[in-house]
């Protein structure tokens, strides 16, 4: 009997030097360097460049890349007009998908597909994603769009464009760390989608538009939004234990825990927990953080033996909320970080491209004949 790899689980189709994951031990590395070190010592700008080039940059290379990002933050006015004229109330991921596709119409280099052209477009897209997402957020709320500033870091500039106020250095750094933690995660549905599109030698904007479509689905992005809904439902820390115990007794899924690959703590959740704790303590330990602490304890005690532990989404929502980001924008924020991983993976794959063309086992009729429409039952 033919073996079908449902969901392509365990199917290897390419090699990559970018990201390594050991799910049973909770290990995640980029270029062999643990995610904890990237979070502690690096920045989103540096990790993005390291992923694009497959190596740690020199100081001069990083300064050049950083300057390129700063210089490319503005998007054409035509795109701002499109964003401002989008219907109110659309999902921000719909708006992002449309905006990125439209941006491709305005880029004279869009149709070039050499690795060099893809690299140049990637740099611009990394810079411009931030401007586009902040503009969508403000336009959807009926606010004036805030132009980017070149004197702020990538993370700081996003928070500035979102609120119109310059964030503190601490807020900018916290957001930077969240971007670092989400920048890449090896092969996954959206990265695979981007690569599948690029394997046809389609253009970079089509690759990233397809990836946004894949990330938009609730089985991929979106769980951190559900965690916030859960926290609001629990209400206060005293209710947390009873709430989660009841859910587990009823065999209901708890949002923000469990992962297809990690069967131990997702290392990104540990980093985010530490930062969430620092922020929470400053505010006299926020309700959200105390609820999460209790849920984590109960989950690990009760179903940790099944390999169910907090994933990256468990703490990210509270961190984003503390930074003034509304939960509808959690998935676009995921895209804001993952654009680097998508672009790097597309470029890496396109260096030794082979059209992705899987197969399906045919299980339909084999001996049928055409029946005229008037003779059909
Ligand atoms: N809450 C409670 N129990 C769970 C959870 C959960 N979130 N996840 C899995 N389990 C239980 C299952 O019921 C099953 O129990 P059983 O053996 O008694 O039947 C056991 O743990 C194994 O679960 P699987 O379904 O085999 O785990 P799988 O790898 O298929 O699921 C998934 C992974 C889809 C992420 C799941 O854990 C889940 O739905 N989590 C909640 C949603 C979430 O947080 N998603 C974000 C993932 S991270 C990201 O995408 C960035």
Image (cartoon, helix red, strand yellow):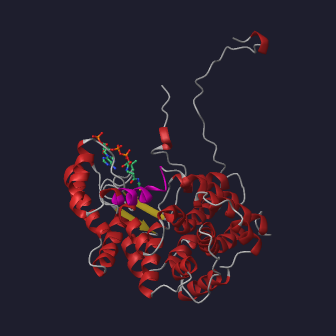
Q: From where the camera sits, is residue 113 visible? A: no
Q: Position of residue 13 (x, y in %)?
A: 54, 49
Q: Nearer the viewer, residue 89 or 75?
A: 89
Q: Position of residue 227 (x, y in %)?
A: 38, 58
Q: Residue at x 72, y 59 (%)?
A: 203
Q: Position of residue 93 (x, y in %)?
A: 59, 59
Which stretch appears magenta?
219-232
Q: Nearer the viewer, residue 111 or 138?
A: 138
Q: Nearer the viewer, residue 78 or 84?
A: 84
**Vertical comparison of 41 with 116: above or below:** below
Q: Nearer the viewer, residue 251 or 183?
A: 251
Horizontal relation, residue 118 to residue 292: left or right: right
Q: Main secondary structure of the magenta part?
A: helix
Horizontal relation, residue 120 to residue 31: left or right: right
Q: Position of residue 231 (x, y in %)?
A: 34, 60
Quadrant (top left, top right, bottom left, bottom right) of the C terminus: top right
Residue 199 falls within the magenta-colored stretch? no
Q: Hey, which quadrant is residue 54 in on the image?
A: bottom right
């Amino acid at each position: 009997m033919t073996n079908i790899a449902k969901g392509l689980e365990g199917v290897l189709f390419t090699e990559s030097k970018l990201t390594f994951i050991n799910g049973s031990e909770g290990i995640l590395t980029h270029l062999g360097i643990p995610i904890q070190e990237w979070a502690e010592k690096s920045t989103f700008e540096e990790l993005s460049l390291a992923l694009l080039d497959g190596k740690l940059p020199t100081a001069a290379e990083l300064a050049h890349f950083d300057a390129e990002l700063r210089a490319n933050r503005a998007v054409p006015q035509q795109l701002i007009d499109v964003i401002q004229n989008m219907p109110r109330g659309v999902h921000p991921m719909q708006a992002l998908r449309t905006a990125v596709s439209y941006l491709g119409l305005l880029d004279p280099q869009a149709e070039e597909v050499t690795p060099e052209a893809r690299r140049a477009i990637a740099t611009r897209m990394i810079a411009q994603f931030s401007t586009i997402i902040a503009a969508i957020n403000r336009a959807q709320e009926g606010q004036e769009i805030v132009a980017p500033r070149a004197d702020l870091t990538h993370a700081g500039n996003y928070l500035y464009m979102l609120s119109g106020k310059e964030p503190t250095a601490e807020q900018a750094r916290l957001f930077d760390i969240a971007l670092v933690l989400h920048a890449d995660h090896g092969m996954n549905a959206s990265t695979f989608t981007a690569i599948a599109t690029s394997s046809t030698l389609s253009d970079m904007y089509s690759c990233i538009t397809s990836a946004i479509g894949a990330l938009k689905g609730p089985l991929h992005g979106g769980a951190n939004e559900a965690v916030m809904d859960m926290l609001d439902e629990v209400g206060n820390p005293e209710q947390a234990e009873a709430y989660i115990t009841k859910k587990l007794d009823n065999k209901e899924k708890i949002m923000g825990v469990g992962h297809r690959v990690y069967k131990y703590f997702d290392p990104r959740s540990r980093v985010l927990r530490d930062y969430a704790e620092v922020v929470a303590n400053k505010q006299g330990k926020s309700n959200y953080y105390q609820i999460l602490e209790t849920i984590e304890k109960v989950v690990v005690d009760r179903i940790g033996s099944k390999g169910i532990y907090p994933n990256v989404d468990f703490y990210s929502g509270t961190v984003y909320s503390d930074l003034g980001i509304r939960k509808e924008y959690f998935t676009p924020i995921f895209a804001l970080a993952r654009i680097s991983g998508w672009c790097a993976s597309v470029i890496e794959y396109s260096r030794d491209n082979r059209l992705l063309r899987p197969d399906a086992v045919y299980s339909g009729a084999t001996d049928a004949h055409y029946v005229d429409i008037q003779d059909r039952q």
